[in-house]
Image: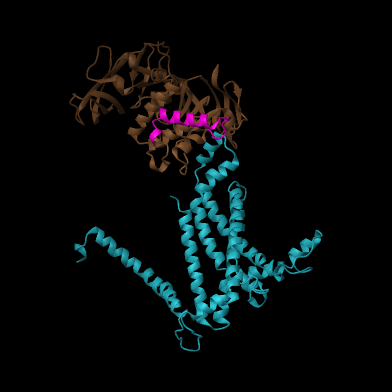
Amino acid sequence: MAEVSIKKLVKRYGDTEILHGIDLDIAHGEFVVLVGPSGCGKSTTLRMLAGLEEISGGEIAIGGRVVNNLEPKARNIAMVFQNYAIYPHFTVYKNIGFGLRTAKLDKREKDKRIREAAEILDLTPLLERKPSQLSGGQRQRVAIGRAMVRDPAVFLFDEPLSNLDAQLRAQMRLEVKRLHRRLGATIVFVTHDQVEAMTLADRIAIMREGRIEQLGTPDELYEQPVNTFVAQFVGSPSMNLLPGTLDADGQVRLEGLPEFAVPWSGPTGAAQPVTVGLRPDEMRVGDGLPGSGRISGEVEIVERLGHDALVYLKAGGHALIAKAEIANALTPGGPVTVTAAPGALHLFERESGRALPRS
Amino acid sequence: MYDRLTIHQKQAFWAWVFLAVPVVFFIVVRFYPTFDAAWISLTNWSLFREPKFIGLANYKEMFQDPVFWKVFANTFKYLALGLPVSLLISFTVAYYLDRVRFMHGLIRGLYFVPYLTTAVAMAWVWRWFYQPVPIGLFNDALSAVGLPQQPFLRSVDQALPSVLAPAIWAGLGFQVIIFLAGLRAIPETYYEAARIDGVGAWTILWEITLPLLKPTLLFLIVISSIGFLRIFDQVYNMTVDGQGGPLNATRPLVLNIYNSAFVDYDMGYATAQTMVLFLVLLVITIVQLRLLRSK
């Protein structure tokens, strides 16, 4: 049975509908990330789950119980906020304990839980400190601690790592992941950062303009994006999208790049205009294997990343990004040839952006 | 010459250039009169004669004067009554007004209008409110519901609170605005987190809102205390002949100072009382700042 079940969830502000009927089932112990650009409705969805926003339509059930009209405290959830929301005038101990204020536990039990949570989160030496004496990462751990002591059915995270610097964010990401494994808790996590989504999630829901574009494991989203939006959103740097055609003979061709011709592995019909997707990671500088599609152009910029490099190139009037070995001697303005293996191709209908099935 | 100064020295130079004007102003208009007053309080200056040094005679006279102790006590009654009542009312108004979206600006404006009105006009309107039937608004209302009339300004017991009421009312708008600003500065997520943790409205108020409002509260307590300790306009305009009657029941220290100076022309005695008021304000402000300063 699903721990969280969202059915046809709708949110309206006045006449403006900003969530258009979301369906999402989350299994017990699952880590689901809602990701998308700002304004896609991910935070609103989470806040409706928490009970901080009214539900305009549809149904939310937590642990098999419909919670549409229940106060947040009755929903058996805990939430971690982007700005931590820990109280500056309380010590760490009191902040963590605040989550237990209304719990029907005796004092000793509460104290035990607070100390347990602090132990797990490495906060034990800091229990008597005030938040102003803590670093950003420590504050976020206090916020997580406050959520943990309540032992909720579902943890909700609202962009919890966004206020941290890059290094700390990577570290906290690991801690959240570790915590999930340790507690086996059900987690719904909102972020706009696709790297965070890919690294943390069991399943990702990619949202845009109040709809879930695709729901799946990180690998599924990376390997089989259902449309150009998902294809570009997942993966860094973004997938190259180039206009081309899928000919009746099953060959994929690119506009303005006559030497590129690669057989398509999926079903073909009459010739049709398509958008061709090529991930920078799957393109190689050099001649490549026989049968690979060749693109020749001019190097614009080379970004060295240490053990490899990103090549920004211009070819046939298109701008592309490709990965290159650092050893390749590439100079801006010089010629470059990149190749893509047939299996690396993604095809999308030109008009709708929907993916064409691969076999 | 200037070019050889370090950046720090240049900054200091310009800081002092710009500070010079307010520094001169404060010395001439604030500090000099304060120190001069301390000197005058040791003389018998009557405006018509040259001041003559008489030592602590003014202070001796003052501490032996029952009227001085009466007005001294009155002044603290204004403070002890006015401060908690005004803060309680203004906080309650601000707390609920903060949740009102409908005509929020207009309502806030209405609360603020009395603050902009001259105290004299307001005092006379309130004086009229307190008249007996059939003129006074309050007594009309009381008799309309069958309650006995009240003497208000003519009673030694009721006069002081009656004079205080318009003072509280006039300052309410200012306090409400400051409280609203303080309430707005508390991040919404604190309340959302508390809702998720399921704590009640009372706990939120006592454990989250009020502690986070401490700087605002401190500011208002200091400003309002000074205001109540210096109450004058309302008393002067609401009591017969501006004497703070009946039987000095409403007379505050500032009115007593005014009478000594501009009715009795005893400048030395007036400044001696002023020095006492000054010291009281100073001590109260320092104590409040100490007590409420966050550790």
Residue A38 at what x, y percent from top left? 45, 34
Q: Is residue A25 left or right of residue A122?
A: right
Residue at the (32%, 14%) spot, across then down:
A342
Residue at the (60%, 75%) spot, across then down:
B66
Letter of the chain shown cyan in the rendering:
B
Q: Quadrant of the N terminus of chain A?
A: top right
Q: Which residues are magenta?
A: A100-125
Q: Is residue B20 visible?
A: yes
Q: From this view, report whether residue A114 is shown above or below residue B259.
A: above
Q: Is residue A40 visible?
A: no
Residue A209 at what x, y percent from top left? 49, 30
Q: Is residue B159 left or right of residue B208?
A: right
Q: Is residue A148 left or right of residue A238?
A: right
Residue A120 at what x, y percent from top left? 41, 27
Q: Main secondary structure of the magenta part?
A: helix
Q: Quadrant of the C terminus of chain A?
A: top left
Hue used for the chain lettered A:
brown
